[in-house]
Image: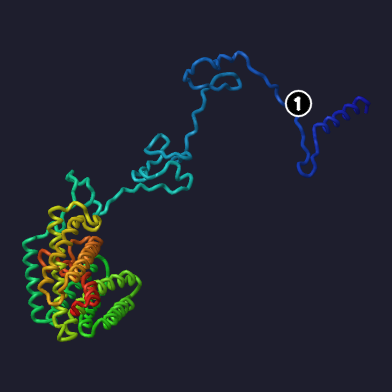
């Protein structure tokens, strides 16, 4: 072998080693390409007419690409998404050439753009609704007129109401003449009817009160109050609550609603049974001593007359001048003007009846009595109206034409009885 051959092979071996680099175990041996393997970089000339100068206005033409041979070819159209696909943050409504899926009308109304891609829950579009009470109180009524607060008792059949009220007054006076026992019969009848009306309305509106336990318990509380006295009233309520609880314990499941239904049952027992029992306690004062034979009946008569005057005065004054609602959300027909009118009528009747009474004989007693009734009677009326508004009923009953039911007629009286009883014990009018 000649020296030239040897040198050539050695040079080739050296060039091979120069084109390779050993980086060890991490990257291994890297071989660089030969210089002659890469084609020269050339810039074509004579094609500058294809690119407009930057100062020229846009032509709106679609740019064309050049192939390696230098010929022009149209740019390929953009790739179409597959059928039913959509880009991020985009919702396609309707059908197009790509076969996009048309969304339903309800989804188009509520779906947020891009919500599905981000995994977010689309916002719901809710139609605003108004309650029946809001529609009644909305000044923008369908008639286009702005309603003003109506007077208390608007819509009442006045002639019928007066006739029924006169019959009730006659029956009450007749029982007073007979004696406390006769008044007790009338009182128990009123309490029993009021209980049935109250629990019946609750049942009709989805509650499940213990109707029998509530009605019997209310009447029993009144009877034991007259028979034994105020010491027996807590015992009667305890037995009533226990009996109502046993009824719900015997239910099949918690679906009977023991908490709300036991609660409304006790509401009726307290409001009608307990408050009504104070009427029996007032009558029982007449049985305490022969010298006090008229105390109970006189006090109950004065109480009934004062409440009736409060109701009548509020009705007529409110109908004539009522403009300011007392509590609009409870009853727009009850007005501040009616409240003032009822208060004035209450003071007037208490003084007039007191002049004929042998029990309540002083001006201080009359004024105190009238003040108590003027505060308690409207509260009782508002409480009953509030509960009726919650149940969305006009009256609890229909027994008394022009008045509704027994509970509608004696709602204020029930609230007045406890205050009058304790006022009588404090003032002790018989001592004068």
Q: Is residue 162 above or below residue 102?
A: below
The reply to whether residue 93 is in sight is yes
Where is residue 168? Give x, y as percent: 9, 71
Where is residue 253? Give x, y as percent: 35, 73
Q: How many marks?
A: 1
Q: Quadrant of residue 1?
A: top right
Where is residue 258? Give x, y as percent: 33, 72
The reply to whether residue 411 is in sight is no
Q: Is residue 137 above or below residue 363?
A: above
Name the quadrant of the C terminus: bottom left
Where is residue 7? Give x, y as percent: 90, 27
Left or right: 168 as drawn, with respect to 364: left
Q: Quadrant of residue 304?
A: bottom left
Q: Quadrant of residue 105?
A: top left
Residue at label 1? Answer: 35
Q: Nearer the viewer, residue 69 or 248?
A: 248
Which class describes the residues within 10 Å of circle 1: few (<14), some (14-19), or many (20+)? few
Applied colour scheme:
rainbow
Q: Residue at x 43, y 36 (%)?
A: 98
Q: Nearer the viewer, residue 192 or 205?
A: 192
Q: Nearer the viewer, residue 387 or 317?
A: 317
Q: Is residue 282 above or below residue 78?
A: below
Q: Nearer the viewer, residue 73 or 85?
A: 85
Q: Residue at x 19, y 81 (%)?
A: 285
Label 1, secondary structure: give it: helix
């Amino acid at each position: 072998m000649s020296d030239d051959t040897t040198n050539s092979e050695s040079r080739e071996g050296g060039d091979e080693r120069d084109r390779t680099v050993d980086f060890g175990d991490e990257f291994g041996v890297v071989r660089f390409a030969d210089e002659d393997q890469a084609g020269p970089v050339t810039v074509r000339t004579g094609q500058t007419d294809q690119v407009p100068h930057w100062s020229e206005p846009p032509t709106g033409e679609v740019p064309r690409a050049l192939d390696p041979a230098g010929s022009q070819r149209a740019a390929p159209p953009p790739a179409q998404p597959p059928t039913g696909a959509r880009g991020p943050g985009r919702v396609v409504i309707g059908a197009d050439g790509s076969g996009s899926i048309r969304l339903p009308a309800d989804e188009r109304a509520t779906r947020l753009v891009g919500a599905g891609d981000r995994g977010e829950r689309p916002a719901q579009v809710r139609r605003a609704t108004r309650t029946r009470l809001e529609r009644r109180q909305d000044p923008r009524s369908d008639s286009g007129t702005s309603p003003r607060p109506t007077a208390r008792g608007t819509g009442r059949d006045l002639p019928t109401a007066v006739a029924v009220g006169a019959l009730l007054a006659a029956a009450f006076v007749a029982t007073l003449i007979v004696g406390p026992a006769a008044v007790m019969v009338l009182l128990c009848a009123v309490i029993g009817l009021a209980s049935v009306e109250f629990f019946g309305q609750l049942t009709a509106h989805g509650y499940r009160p213990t109707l029998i336990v509530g009605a019997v318990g209310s009447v029993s509380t009144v009877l034991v109050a007259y028979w034994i006295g105020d010491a027996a009233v807590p015992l009667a309520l305890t037995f009533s609550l226990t009996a109502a609880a046993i009824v719900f314990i015997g239910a099949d499941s918690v679906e009977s609603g023991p908490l709300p239904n036991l609660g409304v049952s006790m509401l009726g027992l307290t409001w009608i049974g307990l408050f009504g029992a104070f009427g029996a306690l007032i009558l029982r004062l007449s049985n305490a001593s022969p010298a006090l034979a008229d105390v109970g009946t006189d006090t109950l008569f004065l109480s009934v007359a004062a409440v009736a005057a409060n109701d009548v005065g509020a009705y007529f004054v409110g109908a004539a001048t009522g403009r300011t609602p007392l509590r609009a959300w409870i009853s727009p027909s009850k007005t501040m003007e009616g409240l003032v009118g009822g208060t004035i009528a209450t003071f007037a009747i208490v003084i007039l009846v007191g002049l004929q009474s042998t029990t309540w004989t002083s001006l201080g007693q009359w004024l105190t009595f009238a003040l108590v009734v003027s505060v308690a009677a409207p509260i009782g009326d508002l409480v009953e109206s509030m509960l009726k508004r919650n149940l969305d009923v006009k009256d609890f009953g229909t027994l008394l034409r022009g008045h509704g039911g027994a509970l509608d007629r004696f709602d204020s009286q029930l609230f007045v009885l406890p205050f009058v009883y304790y006022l009588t014990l404090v003032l002790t009018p018989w001592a004068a």
